Image (tube, grey):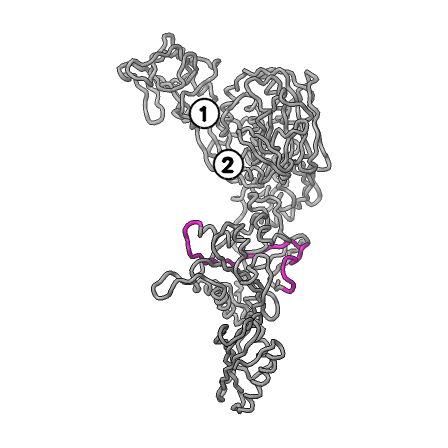
Amino acid sequence: MKFSENWLRQHVKVDASRDELAATLTAIGLEVEELTPLGEQLDGVVVARIVSAEKHPQADRLQVCGVDAGTGAPLQIVCGAPNARVGLVVPLATVGTRVGAITIKAAKLRGVESSGMLCSAKELGLDGDGSGLMELPDDAPIGAPLAECLGLPDATFELKLTPNRADCFGIRGIAFDVAAACDSEVTAAEPVPMPALSDASLPVGLQAGADAPRYVGRVIANVDPARATPLWMAERLRRSGVRPVSFLVDVTQYVMLELGQPMHAFDRDRLQGPVGVRRARAGETLKLLDGRDVTLDDGFLVVTDADRAVALAGVMGGDDTRVGETTRHVFLEAAHFAPAAVIGRARRLGMHTDAAHRFERGVDPELPRQAIEMATRLIVEIAGGAPGPVVEAVLPEHLPQPQSIVLRRARLARVLGLAVDDAEVDRILRALGFAVEATDDGWRVTPPARRFDLAIEEDLIEEVARIHGYDRIPVTLPGGATRLAVPEEGRTPEADLRRQLVARDYLEAVNYAFVDAALLARWQVDAGAVPLSNPLSAELGVMRTLLLPGLVDALAGNTARQQPRVRLFEIGKVFLSRESGIGNRKSGEATATATAAAAGSAPVETLRIAAVATGDARVEQWGEAAREVDFHDLKGDLESLAACAGAQLEFRPGQTAYGHPGRSAEVFRDSTRVGWIGELHPRLLAALELDRRVLAFELDLAALQRRVLPKAGALTRFPSVRRDLAFIVAQDVSWASVEGSIRAAAGPLLAGLHLFDRYQGKGVESGCKSLAMGLILQDKSRTLTDRDVEDVVGRIIAALQRDHGARIRS
């Protein structure tokens, strides 16, 4: 938010200096990002009029101008500005005046005497426009100091506002905070209603429900279309970062900057009526004020004229009904649009507007009528015209209603660590525009409609703290004996898992816990997603339900920047709405780390670990041929993590939506699903515009951290026996199932089991495969006999034949 210091001081009277005001704004949470003084060195710069202009005899691009500076005889000045012309009123820097780094002197330019310099706004440090001379109104007093004419000196403040302070997108909203911090009061600014001087009106209707619960309009007839924007208004707009366009447009911009309520002006003669607000229809087109044609869908709101879309509600007006140089009758609108109905709509069209910026964060629903009255008075007083009656359509049941909040004196003192006087608390709250009612144990406070960010007692405590002064809150060190945290032996530390993945050539990534809802939908993991009520942007609108979407997005960003080999991991929380529970997970998945908040609607949080990899399996080298990373590489990395906790993982075929149907698996530990591993589905990769294979895994961290504590035991004195066996099984029989049958049949004598060969080809019939394995048999109390070994082998052969139709390969 950028604004003029003098404009702010008109709304709140404070004795603080400019630097003190900037420090105060920052201290109360309205960070001053930039402060630019204006017009502090304009001594000697006066208002002048060009009375003659002739071509320079020695230069095509220069003119010799006669300039009236109010001193009697015209001054001769050589000027090269393209807009220099007879009759133009401009700033003149007289001889001896310092402009920027130069001092103006009488000089000869190409042989012609020049006694001063006609200036652009950029040269005077008033604006960034250096394309020509600064043009002043025709009625500006000739010879008067420019600073006096422009209301200088002044300064522009630019605030870096947090998303919750939408009320400070208007001068009035900032003024309330300044008044509270400086023990002052905001000047009264309720506009006196303008009486209707004509019957001209347009009916207004609402068809968008809660998305547009209020719409106010007014016709003003017989406005002077040639009236220029007054200098004082143009300067305030310019110092707020808005370039003046035309009077009717500038009035709506001026009201928006002062009150925070976006407005729009239509050419009444281009409207048929009635005017309404509804959802756009799929495929509906609209030409906007910036000249672009946009195609809409039912996600947009439109303002209509006899059901014809004439404006993109909350974003930008339409070209067909714009006001122009010939506009005689104007229709003013001011409306309240719900943030959810506007947020992200401008960005979808690749644009950003001041109106959308405000509506996305929330605008006071009580402002539209006040804005209409203020704009009406400005138009009538400056450009004449006969206003008609104010027409308002409202759906009261859909308007946000201010709710009272109880602030307890004891709670305030406990949270802040100091007791703030009751009188000071009462003053702060009233200065901020709150309705305050004293109670036995504190206050009952009703915030104004503009303060969407206040809902609970802690919000009021924060208001008291920031206005009272964070620097006045005592700093205390925690007391009591130091408590030493003993690491839990049955849990592998996160740091160990991080070090293990770093040792396996992965880099740790940290992504936002907020993601785009459309991204989760693309992954088909949007069930149970928790939406944010006040997101930073539309692209960060919901809490993530999975780590992988954000991690793969980071991988894509790296590959787009010519990184051929990327390996990333992340440890972080995922979130699911409590109503959905863990509905978007497979039945039985571990949720040991899910933490339930006290509030019933709080989301369920689960700590997870994920990794992604693409490119070559090894860094380019001479000793090994290049090979693309595959499922087994990633499986080895995951098993190395499990080894840190002494865990045995089991991999079973799965049908996860985002996983490749033939190259992914569900991960189990102790018969409980703990995650997923595999290659991403080709359709998902195409939707993400990734043209390479991506391998990934994601697991619940708690299940992976659970560690089996080692138990010391005596080394056996008896030798082991190895038997190698080869079985032929069907192609679709997995090694995991074969291993399970072997371990169940062998019993405690099986000390080790190794698969050392998998074969298909000559000698093995089609649709089958050969699995060769080594069995290590050992007893801790005696030496095994041949009979013992043959008995175990026999049980294994029988079990495999029974469970999998296996037979010994001859």
Q: Residue 96's x, y, as percent?
A: 33, 19
Q: Is residue 179 visible?
A: no
Towards the viewer: 682 or 730:
730
Query: Of callouts 2 and 1, which one flags the residue occurring earlier in the amino acid sequence?
Result: 1
Q: CA distance from mark 2 to mark 1?
A: 20 Å
As drawn, which residue projects farthest toward the top? 72
As drawn, which residue projects farthest toward the right? 397
Q: Residue 416's x, y, as percent?
A: 58, 48
Residue 219 in magenta stretch: no
Of labels 2 and 1, the one closer to you: 2
Q: Residue 135's x, y, as percent?
A: 44, 19
Query: Left or right: 641 with respect to 301?
Result: left
Q: Which mark is residue 262?
A: none
Residue underneath mark 1: 153
> SS at mark 1?
loop
Q: Amino acid at mark 2?
A: Leu
Query: Would you place residue 409 above or below residue 225 in this image?
Result: below
Residue underneath mark 2: 159
Towards the viewer: 291 or 532:
291
Predominant secondary structure, magenta span: loop
Towards the viewer: 579 or 136:
579
Query: Left or right: 120 with respect to 107?
Result: right
The residue positioned 60% from the left and 79% from the top of the image is: 801
Q: Residue 71's x, y, as percent?
A: 38, 10
Q: How many marks?
A: 2
Query: Would you place residue 698 above or below residue 315 in this image?
Result: below
Q: Are there few (<14), some (14-19), or many (20+) residues within 10 Å of tag 1?
A: some
Residue 42 location, quadrant: top left
Q: Which residues are magenta?
A: 560-588
